[in-house]
Amino acid sequence: MDWDKLRVFHAVAEAGSFTHAGETLNLSQSAVSRQISALEESLGVPLFHRHARGLILTEQGELLHRTARDVFAKLSMTEAMLTESREHPKGPLRVTTTVAFGSTWLTPRINEFMSIYPDIQLTLLIDDNELDLAMREADIAIRMNTPRQPDLIQRHLMSIRFHLYASQSYLKKKGTPKTLAELDSHDLITYPPDVRAPIPNVNWIMEMGDPSPNRKPILQVNSVYAIYRAVESGLGIGALPDFLVDSFSKDVTRVLPDVDGPKVDAYFVYAEELRHSKRIAVFRDFLVKKVAETPF
């Protein structure tokens, strides 16, 4: 497959028109059109449906576009890795983590990182679903479970403790539980059991002690951060990571303080091919330093 024609195809697929692609490539509309026609002829399949409002990829065009997009993304990252200075790391860096951790612990510390490394173009992808590092959906992941893919490098970053929390307004209304058995008569906020959670054993509040059939959640929500907000609003008792509560409301307090939830280990994860990236190294070292300063 001719590389120049593939480059033109990628530009057209991204832009949605010959004209806009030509502006990006500094080529005339007719030159772009000729390259696409030649590529379609060499492959023996149409890549675009042409109509008055623009271009739409055919099924074959969609397949080629997905492959070309992955190729150009990897080339862009490789170019950045080859050109970045050892003393002054620069270039794009995409980091993904959970909504709760990313919103409350990580994001407030990014200002300091960017002041130290202003030439790094950082993107935070806050998502409770795991993005695929092997497919370059992100460069780095901070995950609350052990990665399953064998081709990923992982470093233990921190251990996070969970406890039971409720708002002062809820405790004034419903009373403070003194034993685990008393949870059976309280309003509990949990994660839906049929939805994959970003942390293991997320619903330990339903299993502690000797629960009766009466121990049922008043609300199930598929976000640890949303569980916190529901707890903060006075809706009920929830199992929350300590860092989340420490970062926000003073109205939320620990209940059954002698009851410890499971310890959750967080990992700094990235693809093997990025092992020598200076941007990965400086971001990792920055996080290790910030973790050491935080009393988890």
Image (tube, grey):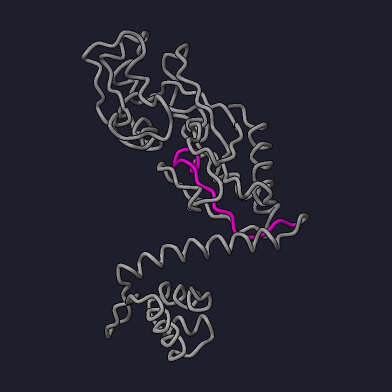
Residue plotted at (50% across, 75% down): 7
Is residue 5 shown left or right of residue 223? right
Which picture quadrant has residue 269?
A: top right
Question: Looking at the figure, which quarter contains the C terminus?
Answer: top right
Residue 24 locus on image (x, y percent)? 51, 80
Asked whether residue 29 is in view, the answer is yes
Residue plotted at (38% across, 81% down): 41
Is residue 89 shown left or right of residue 184? right
Quick check: is 216 in the magenta stretch? no
Which residue is situated farthest in the right direction here? 87
Residue plotted at (50% across, 48% down): 134
Which picture quadrant has residue 199?
A: top left
Residue 266 locus on image (x, y percent)? 54, 32
Q: Is 126 situated above or below 246?
A: below
Which picture quadrant has residue 202?
A: top left
Asked whether residue 167 is in view, the answer is no
Quick check: is 98 in the magenta stretch? yes
Q: Is 117 situated above or below 54?
A: above
Q: Nearer the viewer, residue 43 or 278?
A: 43
Which residue is situated farthest in the left direction here? 213
Q: Nearer the viewer, residue 60 or 201?
A: 60
Residue 141 locus on image (x, y percent)? 53, 43
Residue 99 locus on image (x, y percent)? 44, 42
Is residue 255 shown left or right of residue 123? left
Q: Which residues are magenta?
A: 88-103
Residue plotted at (74% across, 57% down): 88
